């Protein structure tokens, strides 16, 4: 009996040390494992991440110097839930919307997207391999913890049998203000899933817009997705000749960059070859390599070109690939950028991935510092519109642009 009681006690301890998730159980991370994961993150970011200087200037946060503080916080966490909360705070201290644990929270979206991308771009196999260092079950575990911590109101949310699902609003909205000879299109997202889905809608709209003197492309609230959305489905319908603009960015000489972006290292250029006037000081200390690409967009047809006034309406939420459109418009004068300063970080390629070895948490982070035409960091100075429009909301901002157009005809 004594032996059986001891055995039962051991089993109880084992179950206390594990957290159940459906049919799968995970052992709580030890203090050493949590610290090791943080140190792995710290080392990788120190070698590859380009925005520490921007974080100091814009947010007065010296992330690298906070190492001891972060380790202390990690050590004091009592379980995985506390660890994820502290870890999320540490990531938030980087103050960059491309640097987070999103690939963990929506793991399947990233995994399936990268697997599909491999067909056309073999380099994405490195992304698939990195994601396969964890799995969807482990990610679901962290996703549930994330929801409990930050979205508790969704914890017990269930769909009742026979319940009518809410229809998802269309991604593209169009309107025509005939009295102002103005065609208006609002694109809410440049998500990968919309690139093909919206193609015909966009083609039809831009063909009709040819009959109007003004065109408003409203991307307020659009936080990006894929640059292919606008490079394939929008700009080509409005140009007669190919448009090209140079794009510069700096990056660190790290192993992770070499793994995920090997093409960066094929044609590097020296700092002196660009030396734009407003380049951040950290780019001048010798720790960065530089690359020049060309953003090239060819027309759908060489027989038609939109000859009216094009306005790109932006706000502070415009980010990533939608920011890239704002950058393109300013760099090429393709359109007049109007609205408010964007959220930036639209110059570069897909963020890098990093899987922490013990927890299986996958993070993404920006791997290069994209530069504006004047040399300033796009993530730091964003895109400042040609015409600032102050307003309390998106609808008011668009109406003020329409008022501006109206005044031109009075």
Image: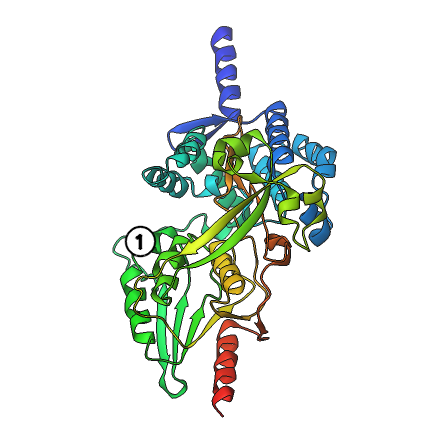
Up-down: is 391 above or below 49? below
Residue drawn at point x = 57 percent, y = 58 percent: 343
Relative image position of residue 292 (x, y in whole percent): 54, 46
> Is 7 situated left or right of 231 in this image?
right
> Is 247 situated left or right of 136 in this image?
right
Residue drawn at point x = 30 percent, y = 75 percent: 208
- Colour theme: rainbow
Q: Quadrant of residue 385?
A: bottom right
Q: Quadrant of residue 291?
A: top right
Q: Residue furthest front?
A: 273
> Is 287 situated left or right of 354 in this image?
right
Residue drawn at point x = 54 percent, y = 27 percent: 28
Relative image position of residue 345 (x, y in whole percent): 56, 52
Relative image position of residue 202 (x, y in whole percent): 32, 65
| Nearer to us in this view, 96 or 328 | 328
Residue at label 1? 160
Q: SS at mark 1?
A: loop
Relative image position of residue 29 (x, y in whole percent): 56, 27
Q: Quadrant of residue 344?
A: bottom right
Mark 1 packing: few (<14 Cα in 10 Å), some, or many (20+)? few
Up-down: is 334 above or below 97? below
């Amino acid at each position: 009996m004594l032996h059986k009681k001891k055995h039962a006690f051991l089993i109880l301890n084992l179950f206390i040390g594990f957290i159940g998730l459906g049919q799968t159980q995970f052992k709580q991370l030890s203090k050493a494992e949590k610290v090791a994961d943080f140190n792995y993150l710290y080392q990788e970011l120190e070698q590859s991440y380009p925005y520490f200087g921007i974080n100091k200037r814009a947010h007065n946060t010296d992330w690298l110097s906070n190492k001891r503080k972060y380790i202390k916080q990690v050590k004091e966490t009592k379980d995985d839930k506390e660890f994820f909360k502290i870890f999320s705070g540490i990531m938030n201290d980087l103050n960059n919307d491309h640097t987070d644990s999103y690939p963990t929270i929506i793991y399947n979206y990233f995994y399936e997207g990268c697997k599909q991308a491999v067909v056309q771009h073999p380099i994405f196999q490195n992304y698939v391999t990195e994601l396969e260092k964890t799995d969807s079950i482990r990610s679901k575990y962290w996703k549930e913890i994330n929801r409990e911590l930050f979205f508790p109101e969704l914890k017990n949310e269930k769909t009742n049998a026979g319940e009518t699902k809410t229809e998802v609003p269309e991604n593209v909205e169009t309107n025509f203000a005939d009295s102002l000879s103005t065609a208006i299109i609002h694109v809410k997202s440049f998500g990968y899933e919309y690139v093909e889905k919206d193609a015909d809608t966009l083609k039809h709209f831009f063909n009709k817009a040819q009959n109007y003197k003004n065109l408003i492309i409203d991307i307020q609230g659009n936080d990006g997705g894929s640059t292919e959305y606008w490079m394939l489905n929008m700009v080509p319908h409005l140009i007669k000749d190919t448009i090209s603009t140079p794009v510069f960015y700096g990056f660190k000489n790290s192993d992770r960059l070499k793994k995920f972006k090997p093409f960066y290292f094929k044609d590097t250029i020296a700092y002196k070859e660009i030396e734009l006037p407003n380049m951040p000081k950290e780019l001048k200390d010798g720790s960065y390599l530089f690359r020049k690409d060309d953003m090239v967009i060819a027309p759908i047809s060489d027989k038609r070109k939109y000859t009216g006034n094009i306005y790109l309406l932006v706000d502070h939420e415009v980010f990533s690939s939608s920011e890239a459109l704002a950058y393109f418009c300013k760099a090429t004068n393709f359109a007049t950028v109007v609205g408010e300063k964007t959220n930036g970080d639209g110059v570069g390629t897909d963020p890098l991935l990093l899987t922490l070895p013990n927890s299986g948490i996958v993070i993404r982070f920006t791997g290069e510092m994209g530069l504006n035409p004047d040399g300033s960091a796009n993530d730091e100075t964003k895109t400042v519109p040609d015409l600032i429009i102050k307003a309390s909301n998106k609808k008011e901002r668009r109406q003020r642009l329409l008022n501006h157009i109206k005044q031109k005809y009075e």
